[in-house]
Image: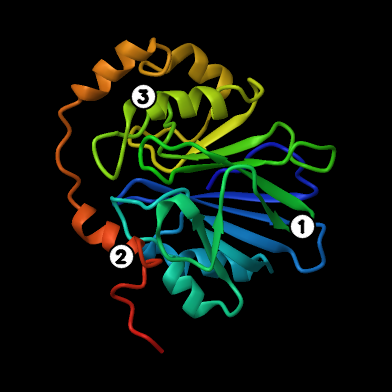
Amino acid sequence: MATATGDSKRILFRQLFEKESSTYTYLLADLRHPDKPAVLIDPVDRTVERDLTLVKELGLKLIYAMNTHVHADHVTGTGIIKQKVPGAKSLISKASNAKADHFVEHGDKVYFGDLFLEVRATPGHTAGCLTYVTGDGPDQPNPRIAFTGDALLIRGCGRTDFQGGSAEQLYNSVHSQILTLPKDTLLYPAHDYKGFSVTTVGEELLYNPRLTKDMDTFKSIMANLNLAYPKMIDVAVPANMVCGLQDVPKV
């Protein structure tokens, strides 16, 4: 687990890892609020027990289990969480066409206590990809923190050949909605396969081997990745379209 910098007196931040799909799950909470309301971003079904144990140990009240997009490489934990945590709600992009309790669109704000996440639409990896960015203000984390899903990875980006992907759309999304944030903004992706945990806008503007190129070069790179068919996609996508509840027995 890693802890981001920021207003440590107000925000609790934990980065959690699921090794089979190399997925990061993020736990955030407002520590100054009496209830210590919390959100989980991109939970994984296999690690729900771990995550909920941590929530309980830290005395938090989980209000949202939310996804950056409909994942193709693992089943989301939101459905199981809803069964285990009374009052917890699932949240996803309206453009994803998936099932959830709450749907958000570009420009919305997701509040947990007095903290909030700004919703930015960053389609291209999938049609419904979102980036969640901590608020801008004196009581919000500084530097700001962005949870980029698969739109922007550390020194990379998500593939664009499935689920309504578009290289051109992804390029425009990242450059207009993520790389325009202050250069010290901390960027936390949904996955990493090389052992990295965090980057910044400034780093990616300098060193991202794909997104530093012009549009035509980027489109050529993405068209020639020759990646294998995602091994979990035929299981994960149908399950995630129904909040991860496809194979969870009802109680």
Viewer can see residue 144: yes
Residue of label 3: 168
Q: Residue 176: x, y in percent?
A: 54, 24
Residue of label 2: 239
Give the residue type that dot 2 points to: Ala
The answer to whether mark 1 and mark 3 are in CB contact below 8 A is no
Quarter of the rendering containing residue 55: bottom right
Marks 2 and 1, how far apart at CA? 33 Å
Give the SS element for disc 2.
Answer: helix
Q: Residues within 10 Å of mark 1 (few under 14, many from 20)?
A: many
Which of these two is toward me, 42 or 221?
221
Q: Residues within 10 Å of mark 3 (few under 14, many from 20)?
A: some
Q: Residue 111: x, y in percent?
A: 70, 55
Q: Residue furthest bottom?
A: 251
Asked if 145 appears above or below 216 in the picture, the reply is: below
Asked if 51 appears above or below 95 in the picture, the reply is: below
The answer to whether mark 2 and mark 1 are in CB contact below 8 A is no
Residue 125 located left or right of residue 82:
left
Residue of label 1: 31
Q: Residue 37: x, y in percent?
A: 70, 63
Residue in the picture at 40% in, 57% down:
97
Q: For marks 1 and 3, give the one nearer the viewer.
A: 3
Marks 1 and 3, how far apart at CA? 40 Å
Q: Residue furthest right?
A: 138
Give the residue type that dot 1 points to: Leu
Give the SS element for disc 3.
Answer: helix
Asked if 236 appears above or below 122 in the picture, the reply is: below
Residue 112, label in figure:
none
Residue 188 located left or right of residue 237:
right
Give the SS element for disc 1.
Answer: loop
Which of these two is toward me, 101 or 230?
101
